[in-house]
Image (tube, rainbow, N blue to C red):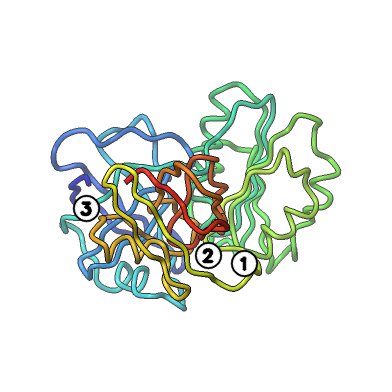
Amino acid sequence: MQRTTLEKVEPVAEGVVQLLLRGTDGPLSPWEPGAHIDLTLPNWLTRQYSLCGDPADRDTYRVAVRHDRLSRGGSEYIHLFLTKGRTLDVSVPRNNFPLLPAPEYLFIAGGIGITPLLPMLKAAVESGAPARLLYTGKSRATMPFTDELQTMHGSRVRIHTSDTHGTPDLAAEAAALGPETLVYCCGPTPMLDTAETVFPAERLHLERFRPAFREFAPNAPFEVHCARSARTVQVGAEDSMLDALNHAGFRIPSGCREGVCGSCEVTLVGGEPEHRDDIGAPPDRMYSCVSRSLSPALTVDL
């Protein structure tokens, strides 16, 4: 973990505040566009937020937080109780949503989904590739960083508000897509679901704040063989692999517990996992908060 001091907390749109976190022990860990951090709050909750500042700035991290009406205690605490000067622990940045090289980019942001895309757009423009942003929201007043984006990028940014323009036509965007254009999309679930139906899957990259609804077979118990410690942990049908490992004394970090942040990653050595995450686990990794096993046992590097 990295120790930071909250240097600034200020509104940037209706229901949205930005936090500027300054490292207290020297330069902060480097990061690339698309990365996020785990932020440990004084009320003992840990929440994940996309970094939306400048990767070249090693002194500070910037995140933005929307006050969720269905808050589980994270955004509500930040908006109502968090004050300038507090010392906060943050994780080393992780990136499950990296910006890949491409000859052209289309970025589509919905509301607070602008946060990972803001530094992506800057990096794409600096690479010399044609890039544009479609930024959607209920109204301009609810959309953070609109002025900053238009000042920096001018006509590359198109602001689309539903109170004036209705629902954005993503099918029309897909029809006009260049043959090698990569699409990066982040925002509310209905927008992401639509994007998945209209854009070519091999060129679409998206990040969800909530897991997509999917159905799986009923949970079955399985064993986890921990290779380095020569121990076996039983995972009951009602238990998550994460909880079983933590109860057995293995300190597995966790954040979202929904399979979208990646903080509970474990290295897979053997067995057939059932990936239930929304990140897209590589073959030798799995996310223990939601994923399970299709074989009677898994072997992990613990």
Count neighbours of disc 3 (C-alpha within 10 A) and say few if under 14, some if 14 to 19, many if 20 or more: some
Q: Which mark is residue 25?
A: none
Q: Is residue 270 shown above or below 41?
A: above
Q: Is residue 8 left or right of residue 242?
A: left
Q: Are marks 2 and 3 in contact (CB under 8 Å)?
A: no
Name of the residue lying farthest toward the bottom:
70
Q: CA distance from mark 3 to mark 1?
A: 33 Å
* Residue located beneath label 3 in the image: 89
Count neighbours of disc 1 (C-alpha within 10 A) and say few if under 14, some if 14 to 19, many if 20 or more: some
Q: CA distance from mark 1 to mark 2?
A: 7 Å
Task: Please identify, in this view, whether the residue under mark 2 or under mark 3 is nearer the observer.
Answer: 3
Count neighbours of disc 2 (C-alpha within 10 A) and say few if under 14, some if 14 to 19, many if 20 or more: some
Helix, strand or loop for disc 2: helix
* Residue located beneath label 2 in the image: 142
Residue type, numbered disc 2: Thr
Residue located 62% across and 67% down the image: 138
Q: Are marks 3 and 1 in contact (CB under 8 Å)?
A: no
Helix, strand or loop for disc 3: strand
Q: Are marks 1 and 2 in contact (CB under 8 Å)?
A: yes
Residue located 21% across and 33% down the image: 27
Residue 158 x %, y %: 67, 47
Count the numbered circles shown: 3
The foreground one among 147 and 3 is: 3
Q: Is residue 66 shown above or below 205?
A: below
* Residue located beneath label 1 in the image: 138
